[in-house]
Image (cartoon, helix red, strand yellow):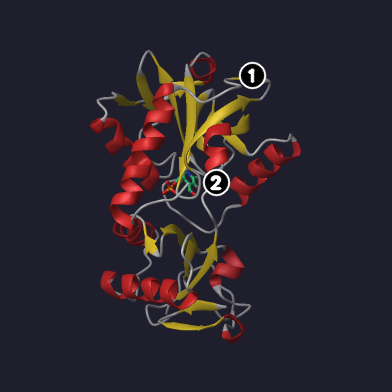
Amino acid sequence: MKVIWNSEIVDRSEVRIDPEDRGYQFGDGIYEVIRAYNGRFFCLDEHIDRFYSSAGKIEMAVPYSRNEMKSLVNRLLEETNIDTGNLYLQMTRGISSPRNHMYPDAGVLPMLTGTMTAVERDAVKQVKGIDTIVTEDIRWLKCDIKMISLLGNIMVKHEAHKKNAEEAILHRDGTVTECSASNIAIVKNGEVITHPDGNLILPGVTKLVWKKCAEKLDIPVVDRPFLLEEMYEAEEVFCSSTTIEVMPVRRIDERVLFTDKPGDLTTALQAEYLKEIEQQCGEIVI
Ligand SMILES: Cc1ncc(COP(=O)(O)O)c(C=O)c1O
């Protein structure tokens, strides 16, 4: 399988990770997930922008220009011949030898890797929705950085898995922030409410897109924190991320939100989101 390794596309077997790479030692690095449909990346500019923004927030200089990054990922897409799938692009701060918490000198180059996996769209799940649990947001206070140290996220995801759910809805003192691997929104009195961007959540690219869709559909969106109690009384709840798109929440702990089909606003946003994908990547055959 072909992968990105620094500025090259190489066979995966050629990649060597140093045991003193800071990503491996400290989780000192950032990443992006970018979805491709019909052999084209969706929202590539937005993801590359967030990659640079995450790097900037941890004072890590990306040793490639935006155009170099874009051409590298497009080359990988072409060489892997993947039509619909996910790109995981990751950059660590490079090698600290001997091990040292301090950021290394500017001469130490970050290490970039990128892998592509074919993953089809799951149109059935888009209607069926996902089951979720509610748990405490145990993560740190810089959740706006898309960083590779994901222990907090994977622990709550595992908790969900143990309870036969797919996603964990997170709260801080009763205020809902986001989920283990997605943003969250609720629908109340015809309005979509979602936590404002800031240090407590990841500024989702998918959220940017569904907000644009809502504007086109004249659906009001309010960025404000909301409490668990408000979520429990909501007409609809949905999660969003690059890999799951706009995903209805069917169950929260023991509360069943719908059995037959998702609510009207969620369904309308899903349809408009699909149009956005088709505009950038061509027709999606369901
Ligand atoms: C914690 C978290 N929040 C939100 C998102 C949604 O981000 P995006 O829509 O850019 O995929 C993700 C995506 O992986 C995530 O991990």
Look at the picture and state if 6 lies above or below 228: below
**Image mark for residue 122:** 2
* Alpha carbon distance from label 1 to label 2: 24 Å
Q: Is residue 157 rendered to the left or right of residue 92?
A: right
Q: Do the residues labelled 1 and 2 touch (CB within 8 Å)?
A: no
Look at the picture and state if 117 lies above or below 280: below
Provide the secondary structure element on which disc 1 rests: strand
Residue at 63% in and 32% down = 131
Q: Is residue 232 rendered to the left or right of residue 264?
A: right
Residue at 43% in and 71% down = 77
Q: Is ligand 1 less than 8 Å from the beta carbon at label 2?
A: no
Q: Quarter holding the N terminus?
A: bottom right
- Which residue bears the numbered disc 1? 255
Q: Label 1: few (<14), some or many (≥20) within 10 Å?
A: few
The image quarter containing residue 42 is bottom left
Q: Where is residue 223 in the image (x, y as percent from the top left)?
A: 33, 28
> Depth check: 79 or 65 in front?
79
Residue 166 visible, this orientation = yes
Residue at 57% in and 20% down = 257
- Hey, what amino acid is under mark 1? Arg
- Hey, what amino acid is under mark 2? Asp
Q: Position of residue 187 (x, y in %)?
A: 42, 21
Label 1 vs label 2, nearer the camera:
2
